[in-house]
Image (tube, rainbow, N blue to C red):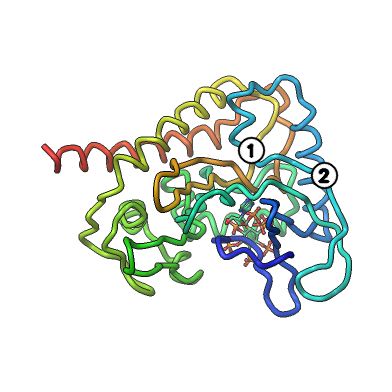
């Protein structure tokens, strides 16, 4: 039975006439192919990546498993439409807290059209992308026990400043959640060491690969950080490959720089949480 995912935090949602992703009970995530070149490019990336023998095993695990494409009934009732069939990366987590972070100090790339460049640069300037090398695109956090869910709205997320982002990263691993369009100025960071400890380990593994890989440039891609309630481990995955371009033998310093900045932010939170426990 296909349904709209409860755990989607960014990107194009199923909304009225607009088709959005679907999930099933077998742990698959169906992403509608965007009608323009984006859909074609994302399929091309997954086909290239999944058959690329130069991808180390420890890196492959950071990407959703690709199960090809399939025409399935779209969420907007428009009949069978082509979808990417991917592993639903959060399927095994109970009540997953999820954050989508778009990595890189720029989301555009030289080959992009003038219109796309303008759209991107406006968003990059108006968010923390240029300043921090990443921006939070969306998140959903489960509180402890009955303390509810926090899923800030799109407009509020788009307004996050550098200071807000530091606080959001803390709120993500806290039990005293804010409500609506607000941030808790005194987050307890009670899950910081377990969640960010595990996430940092994985981000450092990814960083090591980005220090040498010159095959792909991940423009406008995101890291998805998530953890479930209970004993499941925090995980990192990469998503959104509609704008991946050929690396052409050059380091993806845009993504690498953003990753380093994110690592620094999370390390600082871990250090602070450690000091609080001394
Ligand atoms: O449509 P919107 O306003 O949700 O914008 C999408 C973005 O959402 P955001 O504004 O960052 O929350 C969206 O960003 P996320 O993937 O949500 O981080 C993309 O930038 C998307 O463009 P493209 O598919 O990468 O070319 C953007 O889609 P298009 O406007 O290019 O269709
Ligand atoms: N393979 C996946 N498994 C689970 N959730 C996913 C997966 N891919 C994407 N998502 C969810 O959907 C959101 C949007 O995905 P994305 O690929 O960025 O779409 P778009 O191209 O519309 O921006 C992500 O922020 C995440 O919450």
Residue 235 image point, x, y percent: 49, 41
Residue situated in front as seen by the camera: 21 or 127 = 21
Q: Is mark 1 within 8 Å of ligand 2?
A: no
**Ligand 2 location (quadrant):** bottom right
**Quadrant placement of the N terminus:** bottom right
- Mark 2 near mark 1, Cβ–Cβ under 8 Å? no
Q: Establish if 33 lies above or below 211.
A: below
Q: Establish if 77 lies above or below 201.
A: below
Going from N to C along the chain, the mark reached first, 2 or 1, is 1
Q: What residue occupies the far bottom of the structure in this picture? A: 16
Q: Residue at x 64, y 60 (%)?
A: 119
The local crowd at label 2, few if under 14, some if 14 to 19, many if 20 or more residues have their Cα within 10 Å, is few
The local crowd at label 1, few if under 14, some if 14 to 19, many if 20 or more residues have their Cα within 10 Å, is some
Residue 197 image point, x, y percent: 35, 36
**Quadrant placement of the C terminus:** top left
Q: What residue occupies the far left of the structure in this picture? A: 278
Residue 35 image point, x, y percent: 83, 61
- Horizontal side, residue 80 vs residue 67: left or right: right
Q: Establish if 171 lies above or below 241.
A: below
Q: Which residue is mark 1?
A: 63
- Horizontal side, residue 33 vs residue 173: left or right: right
Q: Secondary structure at mark 1?
A: loop
Q: Residue at x 37, y 43 (%)?
A: 195
Mark carried by residue 68: 2
Residue situated in front as seen by the camera: 117 or 23 = 23
Q: Residue at x 82, y 44 (%)?
A: 68
Distance, label 2 to label 1, CA atoms, is: 14 Å
Q: Establish if 229 lies above or below 195.
A: below
């Amino acid at each position: 039975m296909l349904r709209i995912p409860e755990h989607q935090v960014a990107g194009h949602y199923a909304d009225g006439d607009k088709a959005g992703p679907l999930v099933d009970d077998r742990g698959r995530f169906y992403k509608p192919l965007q009608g323009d070149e984006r859909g074609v490019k994302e399929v091309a990336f997954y086909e290239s990546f999944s058959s690329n023998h130069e991808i180390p095993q420890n890196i492959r695990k950071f990407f959703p498993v690709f199960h090809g494409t399939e025409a399935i009934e779209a969420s907007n009732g428009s009949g069978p439409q082509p979808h990417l069939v991917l592993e639903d990366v959060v399927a095994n987590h109970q009540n997953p807290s999820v954050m989508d972070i778009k990595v890189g100090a720029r989301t555009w790339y030289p080959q992009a059209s003038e219109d796309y460049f303008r759209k991107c640069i406006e968003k990059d300037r108006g968010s923390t992308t240029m300043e921090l090398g990443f921006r939070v695109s969306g998140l959903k956090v489960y509180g402890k026990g009955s303390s509810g869910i926090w899923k800030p709205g799109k407009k509020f997320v788009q307004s996050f400043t550098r200071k807000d982002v530091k606080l959001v990263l803390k709120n993500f691993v806290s039990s005293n959640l804010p409500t609506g369009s607000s941030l808790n100025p005194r987050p307890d960071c009670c899950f910081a060491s377990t969640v960010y400890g595990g996430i940092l380990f994985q981000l450092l593994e990814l960083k090591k690969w980005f220090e040498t890989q010159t095959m792909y440039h991940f423009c406008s891609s995101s890291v998805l950080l998530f953890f479930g309630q209970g004993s499941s481990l925090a995980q990192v995955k990469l998503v959104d490959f509609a704008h991946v371009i050929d690396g052409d033998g050059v380091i993806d310093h845009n993504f690498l720089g953003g990753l380093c900045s994110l690592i620094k932010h999370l390390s600082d939170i871990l250090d602070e949480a450690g000091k609080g426990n001394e």
